[in-house]
Image (cartoon, rainbow, N blue to C red):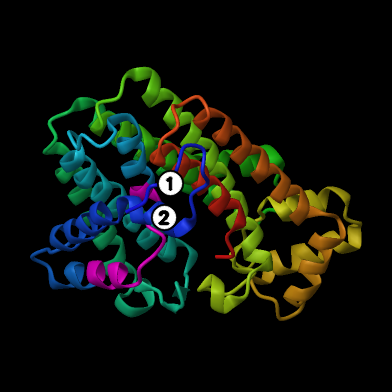
């Protein structure tokens, strides 16, 4: 495969071509490790895996490993194992999130809680968490376990903080950014750090890659918050406007509410109270967010984060993997789902 010339931009397809063989092995690992003695857990694991997904977290981990390791493949086996670990942790969070949010669809299909019920899905999520840690334990590296345990606690705390704020209209920018950090960016950061560990990079490389991926994760979630207002339902794979319907006030709406009139704030309060768009149509909320530039402001914030990620990556020597990670930053801000 042509990996491109020095300084040459890499396309989205080429990003995944660079790591496709290893991503395929990650998929096989996920499938093998999602088999449990309880049939429901196995079925849920297969259902989640068959839905596909961007696999951005294991891709970040694999690219980070290759960036510090080059093509020696010294850490390839560890990177593949850890790629499966982070995707299993991500899958566990999705199971729990769908139960908490009473979601009905994910990725264009009925959510797992609709098919199997809340009780089974909570336990399946617990099982996936423990299975992920069991796989990680095989590496016999306390640094890996420290990162994974720490980020799992932070994500759970983020979910608890979000629950405390459900239905509240007086949410500020700092509140939103804290949730973005805890629920998304920290796991992105850990993915890159785990990749650096697998690739046997030094502590400086691990720290810089972790910071880069944290910025990327912040941008990723901010774009997600925008897409909840702007994407088409078919593309998004779940109903648009779902965050507000679930009682969540995200950053685009926070920015709009800063300038909204008392009457406009009442529209938002009505949706939060009723948890539906029956009285106040979603189109009115979208118009409000657009009127006060909430979407543009959040997109701008996302671009600042990706610019920081690119600046950090520019400190690494040019290589196909460095260019691929730079290209990932463009994918994050330019995606439509």
Identify the residue at horizontal 32%, vertical 29% (top origin). 68
Marks 2,1: beta carbons within 8 A: yes
- Residue range in magenta is 44-59
Identify the residue at horizontal 20%, vertical 73% (top origin). 43
| Image position, residue 25 (x, y; %) | 20, 56
Q: In this view of the protein, which residue sits in the foreground, 133 or 319?
A: 319
Give the mark, 2 or 1, whose residue is nearer the N terminus: 1
- Tell whether 205 sits left or right of 286: left
Q: Is residue 76 visible?
A: yes
| Image position, residue 247 (x, y; %) | 62, 61
Q: Which quarter of the figure is the C terminus placed in?
A: bottom right
Which image quadrant for residue 271?
bottom right
Q: Give the SS element for disc 1.
A: loop
Which image quadrant for residue 198?
top left
Identify the residue at horizontal 47%, vertical 37% (top origin). 6
Judging by the rendered image, the residue that carries numbered circle 2 is 14
């Amino acid at each position: 495969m042509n990996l491109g010339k020095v300084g040459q931009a890499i396309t989205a397809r080429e990003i995944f071509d660079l790591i496709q063989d290893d991503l395929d092995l990650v998929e096989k690992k996920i499938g093998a490790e999602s088999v449990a003695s309880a049939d429901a857990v196995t079925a849920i694991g297969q259902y989640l895996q068959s839905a596909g997904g961007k696999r951005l977290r294991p891709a970040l981990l694999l690219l980070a490993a290759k960036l510090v390791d080059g093509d020696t493949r010294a850490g390839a086996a560890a990177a593949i194992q850890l790629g499966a670990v982070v995707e299993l942790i991500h899958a566990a969070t999705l199971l729990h999130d769908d139960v908490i949010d009473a979601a009905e669809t994910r990725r264009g299909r009925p959510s797992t809680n609709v098919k199997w019920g809340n009780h089974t899905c909570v336990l399946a999520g617990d099982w996936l968490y423990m299975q992920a840690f069991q796989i990680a334990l095989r590496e016999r590296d306390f640094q890996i376990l420290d990162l994974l345990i720490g980020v799992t606690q932070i994500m759970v705390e983020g979910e608890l903080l979000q629950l405390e704020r459900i239905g509240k209209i007086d949410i500020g920018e700092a509140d939103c950014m804290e949730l973005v950090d805890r629920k998304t960016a920290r796991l992105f950061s850990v993915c890159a750090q785990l990749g650096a560990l697998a690739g046997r990079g030094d502590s400086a490389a691990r720290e810089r890659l972790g910071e880069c991926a944290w910025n990327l994760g912040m941008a990723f979630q901010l774009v997600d918050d925008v897409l909840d207002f702007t994407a088409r339902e078919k593309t998004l794979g779940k109903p648009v406007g779902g965050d507000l319907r679930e009682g969540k006030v995200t950053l685009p709406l926070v920015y709009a509410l800063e300038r909204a009139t008392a009457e406009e704030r009442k529209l938002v309060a009505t949706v939060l109270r009723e948890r539906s768009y029956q009285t106040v149509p979603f189109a009115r909320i979208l118009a409000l967010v657009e009127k006060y530039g909430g979407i543009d402001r959040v997109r701008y914030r996302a671009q600042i984060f990706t610019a920081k990620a690119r600046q950090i990556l520019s400190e690494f020597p040019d290589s196909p993997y460095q260019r691929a990670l730079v290209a990932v930053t463009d994918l994050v801000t330019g995606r439509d789902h």
